[in-house]
Image (cartoon, rainbow, N blue to C red):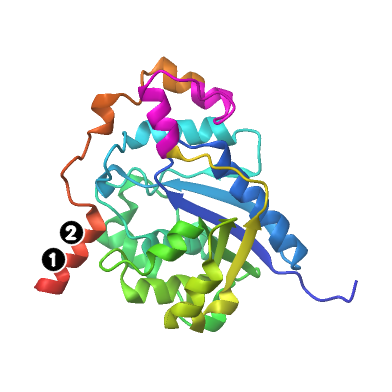
């Protein structure tokens, strides 16, 4: 050992988890292997399911998605946090990351309940938030990184899905671990985007060479049709789905015709 301090990392995955699949869990394992090979120490992973206010078509209630995530990750190094999922309105991903970063920075200030997004609490949290790109580690040298798939990286280029300043904050201050598969071209997308290129050193690309095409969309389709999805989901999650009769033709039509929350919010802002 050369005595060099090892940077500690907490991985945060945001998304629908509708439902959580084995591939979601696999992403954490791949990211940890890659980062630890690169000299980091991964302390834990956090799953943060999006709230119902996201308004995505077919998105079932957060209480179910949270419980399935808990069942999937029990007895592992991955935890589930309900803060984002229980907010009454959709919370931008950058704000979600900032929330967990501030919990790391000042845990004694954060006895959080569902109402932590309210102004008074939010103001106290933001007093601890430092926007300098040189301060992405907290006081004990731990970094928080966003974990995602290549589809999220490419979604940065979709108009009105992300705020430009949020992309800059996520990439410039926190960093990104992107899990990709054969057929994806994240490096090409980074090359084509000036913003991603500027922050390319904060983007860790992890290639998944074991072909795995599990997706929550495919799982929901199979469940609606009464087909087996065993071995695509943890057994506890599958049992929960059957017990609560989740994912039907009716549930897939939830939010049909409703504008996705970020499109509605950012489109309104751009026209006001």
Quadrant where the C terminus sits is bottom left
Left or right position of 29 against 184: right
Q: Is residue 111 visible?
A: no
Q: Which residues are magenta?
A: 217-238
226 inside magenta stretch: yes
| Quadrant in the rendering for residue 71 | top right
Q: Which residue is mark 1?
A: 268
| Quadrant in the rendering for residue 234 | top right
Q: Which residue is mark 2?
A: 264
Q: Decide: marks 2, 1 in contact (CB < 8 A)?
A: yes
Identify which residue, 172 or 104, lies in the foreground: 172
The x, y position of residue 264, in whole percent, is: 18, 59
Left or right position of 261 against 22: left
- In what element is the residue under mark 2? helix
Residue at 28% in and 42% down: 52
The x, y position of residue 96, in whole percent, is: 40, 58
Q: CA distance from mark 2 to mark 1?
A: 6 Å
- Tally of numbered discs: 2
Residue at 60% in and 71% down: 139
Residue at 32% in and 66% down: 158
Is 196 placed above or below 144 here? below
């Amino acid at each position: 050992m050369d005595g060099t301090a090892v940077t500690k990392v907490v991985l945060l995955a945001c998304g629908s988890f509708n439902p959580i699949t084995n591939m979601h869990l696999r992403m954490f394992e791949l990211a940890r292997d890659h980062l630890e090979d690169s000299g980091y120490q991964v302390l834990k992973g956090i799953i943060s399911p999006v709230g119902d206010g996201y308004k995505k078509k077919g998105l079932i209630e957060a209480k179910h998605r949270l419980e399935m995530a808990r069942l999937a990750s029990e007895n592992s190094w991955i935890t589930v946090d309900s803060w984002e999922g229980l907010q009454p309105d959709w919370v931008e991903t950058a704000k979600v990351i900032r929330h967990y970063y501030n919990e790391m920075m000042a845990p004694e200030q954060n006895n959080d309940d569902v109402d932590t997004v309210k102004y008074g609490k939010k103001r106290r949290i933001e007093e601890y938030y430092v926007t300098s790109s040189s301060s992405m580690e907290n006081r004990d040298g731990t970094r928080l990184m966003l974990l995602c798939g290549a589809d999220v990286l490419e979604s940065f280029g979709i108009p009105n899905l992300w705020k430009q300043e949020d992309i800059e904050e996520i990439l410039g201050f926190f960093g990104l671990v992107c899990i990709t598969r054969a057929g994806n071209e994240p490096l090409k997308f980074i090359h084509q985007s000036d913003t991603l290129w500027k922050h390319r050193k904060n983007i860790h690309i992890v290639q998944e060479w074991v072909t795995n095409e599990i997706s929550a969309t495919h799982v929901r389709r199979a469940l609606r049709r009464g087909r087996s999805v065993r071995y695509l989901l943890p057994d506890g999650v599958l049992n929960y789905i059957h017990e609560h009769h989740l994912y039907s033709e009716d549930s897939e039509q939830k939010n049909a015709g409703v504008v996705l929350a970020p499109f509605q919010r950012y489109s309104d802002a751009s026209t006001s």
